[in-house]
Image (cartoon, grey):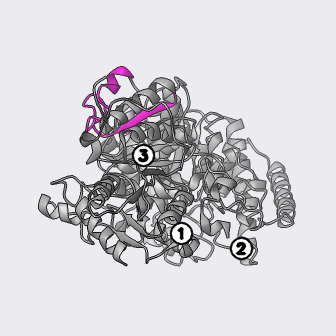
Amino acid sequence: MSAITYLEAIRLAQQKALQDDPRVFIYGQDIGGFGGAFKATKNLAKEFPGRVLDSPISEDAMVGLAIGAAVEGMRPIIEMQFADFSTCGFNQIVNQAATLHYRTGTPCPLVVRLPSGGTPGGGPFHSQSMEAIYAHYPGLIVMTPATVEDAYTMLLEAVALDDPVIFCEHKFLYYHLKADKLPETVLPFGKAKIARQGRDATVVAYSAMVHEALAAAEELTHDGYDIEVVDLRTVRPIDTDTILASVARTGRLLVVGEAWPWGGVAAEVIARVATEGFGLLDAPPQRLNAKETPVPYHPALWGTHRPTASSVANSLRQLLEL
Amino acid sequence: MTLGKASDSDGPRATKHSPEVTRENARRAYRIMLEARILEEKLAVLYRSGKIVGGVFLGRGQEALSVSLGIHLRRGDVYAPLIRDQAGRMAFGDTILDTMRTYLGSSLGSMRGRDGNIHRGRPSEGYHAMISHLGAMVSTVCGGLMAKRFRGETGAVGGTCIGEGGTSTGSFHEGMNLAGVEKLPIVVVVANNQFSYSTPNDRQFACNDLLVRAEGYGVRGRRAVGNDLMDCLSVIGEAVSAARSGEGPQLVVADLLRLVGHGEHDDASYIPAAMKESSLGGDCLDLARTTLLEKGWLTGEEAADWQKIVEKEVEETSSKVLREPSPDPSEEDWNAFSCLDSQQNSRYPEERQ
C-alpha cells in the first residue's frame, strides 16, 4: 500500500464506517459525485449509492437533519465544507444536538466534520479553528486528531459514540502527513498521548500544533533541552491526568493552540494545571496562540499569525529561563 | 396589517379539497380540544398562584388547527409541535399527566425538571421536544423522515407547526427548501395568528400571503380556516394523506387569532378590538361545539358530561403532580454526555473536588 495521507485516512474511515454500519450516511455540500471540496468522500457516493448525498447550502438544516436522523437511530456524518461555515449551523449544534440527551434522555449520535485551521491564502473565512467554541458546550465531544493514525481511528470512534462529536480535522495536515499503514490498535477514547518524551518542559498541543511543537522540541535539543510534547487528541473530554503527570515530570508548561487565546483550550489547560497541579510548577504556565486578529490572507501574515515551530521554540526558551 | 385572504384561491399549486370529515374524527378532535383548553386554563391558574415558574404559553384559539395535525398522525410518524400545540400533542399521545409534570418540573415527568413547559417530548418515540429557536424543528423532522427512507420504511409522515413569525427565520427557510429538495413526506402547518408576540404581520413579512411561499419551495400549498375545526380536519387530513401517499411536502397556512397573550405574562393589549370581533376572533372551541351539535354528532348532555369529566381529571392530576417529588440536585448526575459515565466524568477536576 502506498503512503496514506491524513485526508485519505479520513476518506478510508468513512468508507469503513459505511461498510460496517448500515446506519451511517454522509450529508454535505458537494460530497456526492464530486467527492467533496477536499475529496474526503471521493468515490464514496458511487460505492454506497444513496448514502453519500449532496446537501443544499444549508448548514442549519444539514445539522437539523442529522439530529432528526440520529434520534431515529441513524449515525449521520455531516461534512461542513469549511469549519468556518459551521457557524451557520451553530444553533442546531449547540442548542439542539448538545442538549438533547440531557433534556430528553435520547442520545444524539452524529458527527460533524470540520475541515479546520489555516492554510496559506485561506484568509479569514476558510481558516478558523472552532474547537474551543464547541468544547464550551456540555454535551459535545470535540476531537482534534494530529496524526494520520488518529484521523482514521478517531473518526471511526466518533461514529460509534452515542454523543454528538465535533471532529476538527486540520486542512494543513490533509496532504502533509503520511503514514505507511493504518493502525491496528486504538488508544482509549479521551486519552491524551505523549508524542515525545522529555524532562525539561511540557508542551501541550493538539491538531497541527503538535507538529510545530515536535519541531520546536527538536530544535531545542541543540540547546541541550529535552522537551516533552503531549498531544491532547480530544479536547473535550480533556485528559487532565496525562497533562498533570507530564507537568509533574517537567515542572514547566507551555500550551500551544492555533485558535485565539481568549477563553480557549490553552486557557482551559492552564486553569486545570493551576487548580490541580500548582505545586508541580517550577515556573508560571505559559500559552502561545494565534494573534488576536482575524486569520489574514497573505502567506507571510498567516505564517506569523499562527504559532510555528520557531515561535514555539522561542516561547520555550523564555519558559526555560523563568 | 397583512391579513391572509381566506377567500382567495389557494395559489398556483394549490387546489381546494373538502374530503369527508368523519363523525368519529370530529368528536375525538373536539374532545381533545376541550381537554387542551381545560388543562391550559388550569395551567394559567397554577401560574398565577406561583406554582409554575418560568412561563405558561397557551394555545387558546388555536386548538382546532393544532389538533387537526396531531389527529392525522399515527405511531411511527414524526411530530414536532411548537408553542401552541397542546391539542395536537394530546392527539399524538401526550397526556394531561405528563404536561402537568413538565410544567411543574416533576422528576417523574418526561423532562425530569431538566426542561419545562412546552419543551416537552419523547424523541425516541417520534415526538420531538422543541427548542426555542424558531424554525429549527423543520429540519429535524426532515431528518427523522430521511432515517425512515434510508431504512426502506414507507408510509410515515412528519408533521410540524410554526407561527407566521417563525417563517421569517433562516432555519425555517433552510428546512423547507431541504424538504422540497429531498421530496420528503412532511406537513408544515403555519398558524398565522397575526402577531409574533407583539409584532404585527406588516413588520414580519412583505408578501401578501404566506401561501405563495409554497411555490418558492416547490411544495404543495393549502389553506385552512384556522378556527374552523371541520375545515382544518379536512385540509390537514388531505395534506397528511397526500404526504403519506408520496406526493411530497405540504405547506398548510391557516389564519386565526391567538385568544391569549404570547404567554400568561402578556395581556395582548396590542391586538385591536376590531380584529378580535372579526371572523378571525371566533373561538374555535365554541364554533366546533356548535357545528357538532348542529350536525347531531354531539348532544348537549355529552358536551356537558365531557366538560365535567375533563375538569375532574385535570383537577385530580394537578393535585397528584403537586405532591410529586421535585428533582433533587444532590441526586442529579450533572452529566450532559451519554457516552461518559459518572466515573469518566471525574476527568473533570473541578467535579472531583
Label 3 and label 2 in one chain = no
Q: Could you give the CA–CA distance between mark 1 and mark 2, rounded to whole angstroms?
A: 25 Å
**Residue A95 locus on image (x, y percent):** 50, 58
User: What residue is shown with label 1?
Assistant: B276
Chain under numbered label 1? B
Asked whether residue B106 is in view, the answer is yes
**Residue A2 locus on image (x, y percent):** 28, 25
The amino acid type found where label 1 is placed reads Lys
Q: Could you give the CA–CA distance between mark 3 and mark 1, rounded to whole angstroms?
A: 48 Å
Horizontal arrangement in the rendering, residue A320 relative to residue B228 (left or right): left
Disc 1 is placed on an element classified as: helix
Chain under numbered label 2? B
The amino acid type found where label 2 is placed reads Tyr
* Contact? badges 3 and 2 (CB < 8 Å): no
Is residue A31 inside the magenta stretch?
Answer: yes
Disc 3: CA contacts within 10 A as few (<14), some (14-19) or many (>=20): many
Q: What is the magenta range?
A: A22-48
Where on the picture, by quarter, is residue B52? bottom right
Residue extending furthest toward the front? A224
- Which of B266 and B171 lies nearest the eye of the viewer? B171
- Which of A102 and A241 lies nearest the eye of the viewer? A241
Horizontal arrangement in the rendering, residue A210 relative to residue B42 (left or right): left
Q: Which mark is residue A112?
A: 3
**What residue is drawn where x is 39% and y is 41%?**
A151
**What residue is drawn where x is 76% and y is 74%?**
B51
Label 3 and label 1 in one chain = no
Is residue A88 inside the magenta stretch?
Answer: no
Where on the picture, by quarter, is residue B114? bottom right
Q: From the viewer's perspective, is residue A15 above or below residue B33?
A: above
**What residue is drawn where x is 76% and y is 45%?**
B298
User: What residue is shown with label 2?
Assistant: B47
